[in-house]
Image (spheres, rainbow, N blue to C red):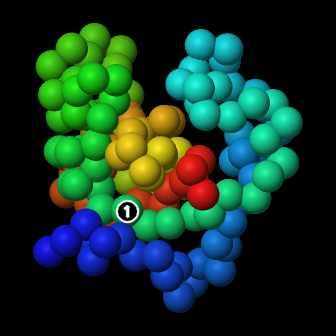
Amino acid sequence: MELRDRIKILLEDNDTQSTITLNKHYEGQYPEDNEIIWNYVSRIDFDEELNIIYIDVQDIFNNWLFGDVTIKEAMQYADTEQIGTINYYKNNISEAKRKPIIVDFIDKIVVDGYHRIAGMALAKENFIKAIDVTS
């Protein structure tokens, strides 16, 4: 199955939200200055409506990048605290799905949410909502 076939652009029946601002996503707070998100947006972009899409969790885990490696490969470098966060999301799927992850859909990079992706992938989840900063 091709990637585009695995992406569910149409929202599920009970979810009518198709766009969101980063201001709403981050609940009025700005991420820390060292977060990857700042490579993609500036503070003035936080009120811009961005598309929400559904993406295949396993594809992101196995093929999308976090830095120079896939998320699956990056797990071998995770410290104890990061493993704890990943396991928390693995065991609390509803919390992992509570907010969309943030992605660069063009370059297949996870911008924010890699711990949630790792936890969901280990729990064998299928899809997650994502905010595309390239939309």
Residue located 57% across and 21% down the image:
35
Q: Is residue 12 left or right of residue 85?
A: right
Q: Which residue is mark 1?
A: 55
Q: Residue furthest front?
A: 106
Q: Secondary structure at mark 1?
A: strand
Q: Residue at x 50, y 36 (%)?
A: 112
Q: In the picture, which quadrant includes the C terminus?
A: bottom right
Choose between 125 and 39: the one closer to the eye: 39
Percent coordinates x, y for residue 109 in the rendering: 39, 39
Which of 25/65 is in front? 65
Q: Position of residue 7 (x, y in %)?
A: 35, 70
Q: Residue at x 29, y 56 (%)?
A: 57
Q: Residue furthest bottom?
A: 13
> Is residue 84 among what the camera can see?
no
The spot of residue 83 in percent (x, y) is 28, 23
Where 8 sits versus 105, above or below? below
Q: Nearer the viewer, residue 16 or 68?
A: 68
Q: Position of residue 34 (x, y in %)?
A: 59, 13
Q: Amino acid at mark 1?
A: Ile
Task: Count residues near mark 1 (Cα–Cα under 10 Å), then give few for <14, some for 14-19, many for 20+.
Answer: many
In the rendered image, is residue 48 in sight?
Answer: yes
Q: Does 51 sit left or right of 48 as displayed?
A: left
Image quadrant where one finds the N terminus: bottom left
Above or below for 1 versus 117:
below
Residue 2, image quadrant: bottom left
On screen, 53 above or below 65? below
